[in-house]
Amino acid sequence: MISFDFQQSLRSRQTRKMQNYICSECKKSDIKLWRGYSEELAILRCVDCTCKHEKVKSINENDLKKTDAIKWSVPAVPSRPNSYWGYTSVPENMVQWWNALPLRA
């Protein structure tokens, strides 16, 4: 029987389209990234760099079940090149894409 991992397929297709989806500080990619809630220019950060920036303790997957925001940083979900969906406007397929990304590499 052939198994198909929908989440992996969705993640890899979308990530290939977003070559600049990397942490601006540590340069990690293919993971969940956050941006400032109302930043004019989005600075993308991985979970660890976001925690340092927001001055919070480390976060794990269980913490993200309550909320996906880290203080004033929200998921960076691309809408088009160098642009990101508003926090409450992300379409369901892109919510699934972001949720499918690993928290850390």
Image (cartoon, rainbow, N blue to C red):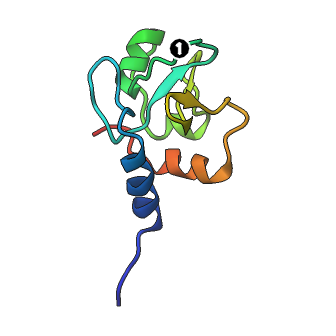
Extreme front residue here? Answer: 81
What residue lies at 58% left-to-right and 13% top-to-bottom? 39
Does residue 105 appear in this view?
Answer: yes
Q: Which residue is mark 1?
A: 41
For numbered disc 1, what is the local secondary structure?
loop
Q: Position of residue 73 (x, y in %)?
A: 55, 20
Does residue 78 appear in this view?
Answer: no
Quarter of the figure with residue 19: top left
What residue lies at 57% left-to-right and 17% top-to-bottom? 71
Q: Position of residue 87 (x, y in %)?
A: 67, 30
Q: Is 80 left or right of 24, judged from the image as shown?
A: right
Amino acid on which the number 1 mark rests in the picture: Leu
Assess disc 1: are there few (<14), some (14-19) or many (≥20) residues with their C-alpha within 10 Å of its C-alpha: few
Q: Is residue 1 above or below residue 92?
A: below
Viewer-nearest residue: 62 or 53: 53
Q: Is residue 71 above or below residue 66?
A: above
> Could you tell me which quadrant the C terminus lies in?
top left
Number of marks in the rendered image? 1
Q: Position of residue 90 (x, y in %)?
A: 67, 40
Q: Is residue 70 above or below residue 67?
A: above
What residue lies at 51% left-to-right and 18% top-to-bottom? 42
Q: Position of residue 60 (x, y in %)?
A: 42, 34
Quarter of the figure with residue 5: bottom left
What residue lies at 50% left-to-right and 28% top-to-bottom? 82
Viewer-nearest residue: 72 or 13: 13
